[in-house]
Image (tube, grey):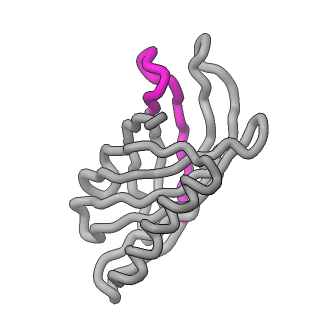
């Protein structure tokens, strides 16, 4: 388990530097209080990819996710709204690992702050789990 975590964290950091991915700090509620890092990369005009790792206070203390981000529209001037679809893994002890999928709405430039975003959604891993997160892009 330790080797896997080190490898995944290294992958997030190294891929971020090699592909010029945009790092973000995230925190919120995701099966308990959660905090972590993620990277985001715009692949085309209206779509991109996201991946990250979070620590949580829930029953499964580690969350890994990988997915896509699809631009939908602007909620207001300079406030893009996107749809996030991802594969998510909740990990704990070796007998307590679960994998599933998630869907979320992502509001960029939240509260008029350009590098801030809000994510609201649901992860379906064994049961449905709500996701409410606030993130800050590190430039």
Q: Which residues are magenta?
A: 101-117
Instruction: Answer with the quarter of the image where residue 135 lies.
Output: top left
The stretch drawn in magenta includes residue 112: yes
Q: Residue at position x 34%, y 88% from top?
A: 95
Q: Residue furthest front?
A: 18
Residue 122 vs 116, above or below: the answer is below
Q: Residue at position x 30%, y 77% from top?
A: 92
Q: x, y percentage for residue 5?
A: 39, 74
**Residue 71 or 136: which is nearer the viewer?**
136
Q: Residue at position x 68%, y 42% from top?
A: 42
Residue 103 vs 47, above or below: the answer is below
Query: In screen coordinates, is 60 left or right of 3?
Result: left
**Residue 11 or 132: which is nearer the viewer?**
11
Residue 53 vs 72, above or below: the answer is below
Query: In screen coordinates, is 79 left or right of 118?
Result: right
Q: Residue at position x 51%, y 67% from top?
A: 11
Q: x, y percentage for residue 83?
A: 62, 41
Q: Quadrant of the N terminus?
A: bottom left
Q: x, y percentage for residue 99?
A: 49, 73
């Amino acid at each position: 388990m330790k080797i896997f975590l080190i490898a995944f964290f290294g992958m997030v950091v190294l891929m971020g530097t090699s592909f010029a991915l945009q790092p973000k700090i995230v925190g919120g509620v995701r099966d308990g209080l959660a905090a972590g890092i993620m990277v985001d990369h715009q692949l085309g005009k209206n779509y991109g990819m996201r991946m990250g790792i979070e620590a949580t206070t829930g029953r499964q203390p580690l969350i890994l996710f990988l997915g896509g981000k699809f631009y939908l529209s602007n909620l207001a001037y300079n406030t893009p709204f996107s749809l996030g679809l991802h594969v998510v893994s909740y990990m704990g002890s070796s007998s307590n690992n679960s994998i599933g999928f998630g869907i979320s709405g992502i509001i960029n430039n939240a509260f008029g702050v350009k590098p801030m975003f809000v994510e609201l959604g649901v992860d379906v891993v064994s049961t449905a789990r709500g996701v409410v997160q606030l993130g800050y892009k590190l430039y």
